[in-house]
Amino acid sequence: MHSALNRAQGVFGFFTTVALFVAGLAALSVLLYPTDAITSSIKIRDAKVTKGRPHYYSTKKEEYAQLRFDLDADLTPLFNWNTKQLFVYVYASYPSDPSDPTSPLSHSVVWDTIVRAKESPYSIDALRERFSRATSSTKKRPSKMKMTSTKKTNPHGVLKLRDQRAKYSIGDVSGKMAGRENVTLSVGWNVQPWVGALWWSPGSGSVPRTEGDIGVSKGVDLPALKSKVMASAGAAGAAAV
Ligand SMILES: *[C@@H]1O[C@H](CO)[C@@H](O)[C@H](O)[C@H]1NC(C)=O
């Protein structure tokens, strides 16, 4: 005869096996959602170079480039039932050696954002909300779903930014950014799932990768210290190099 403990162990063991199997299926199911319809495009609007200190007590000043850009991206294909949130970022690439345009590129992230998946109508919060509304009509709690849906103006997963200021300025070990040539901006993303692998954007070099079109801007040349250059003039300069 089996004791109660044996039975409990058997049930628990079966439960964990089933949970593992279901999680594996959920992780694999994202392969059923095509991601090749993703589009993104980015354009540099403005570039500025200023001097600043790397930290408060530093006596040495370094040059930093601050960019502004326009971004259009349709990342809706990345939202499937296993998507928890997207990490979307914009990074600048430029030749690491200012005197050699063919030198390996330096990359640095200048802007990022997190786009959370819409709350499922079957999430614990949504069900609790529906249940409490059905039982007591007097007690009203603010719904998380409503709060997120009123905040959004664009459809979920669509980004449309105009003249967006970069969150982070670019600097590197040389401390010199003025006059750097052919600085481009590119779009990247990470899909953070509920279960399974972290997916990267194409062009990141990491696996697994989604498909889709990563936007890459035209190259601009950074201006001299504390002056501005329009993107079109910079692009013409880059083409002339
Ligand atoms: C600018 O850099 C990109 C890569 O970031 C490269 O493909 C392109 O050829 C470069 N253009 C010039 C004019 O050097």
Image: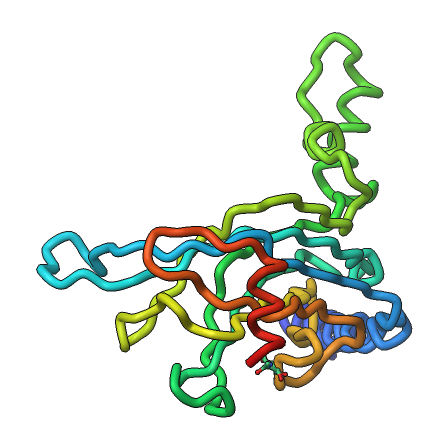
Q: How is the image coloured?
A: rainbow
Tally of numbered discs: 0
The outermost residue toward the front is: 240
Which residue corresponds to the image point at 50% horizontal and 68% vertical from the top-left?
221
Is residue 1 positioned above or below 48 on the image? below
Which residue corresponds to the image point at 73% horizontal and 61% vertical from the top-left?
41
Q: In which quarter of the image is the N terminus?
A: bottom right
Is residue 145 positioned above or below 4 on the image? above
At which x and y percent is residue 70? 65, 51
Q: Can residue 4 be seen in this view?
A: no
Would residue 221 appear left or right of 42 to someone viewing this image?
A: left
Which residue corresponds to the image point at 65% horizontal and 66% vertical from the top-left?
217
Q: Ligand 1 shows up in which quadrant of the image?
A: bottom right
Nearer the observer, 52 or 37: 52
At which x and y percent is residue 100? 43, 89
Q: In which quarter of the image is the C terminus?
A: bottom right
At which x and y percent is residue 151? 69, 31
Would residue 202 appear left or right of 180 to someone viewing this image?
A: right
Is residue 18 positioned above or below 65 on the image? below
Would residue 204 appear left or right of 129 to someone viewing this image?
A: left
Q: Is residue 138 visible?
A: yes
Nearer the observer, 79 or 217: 217
At which x and y percent is residue 160? 72, 46
The image quadrant that residue 4 belongs to is bottom right
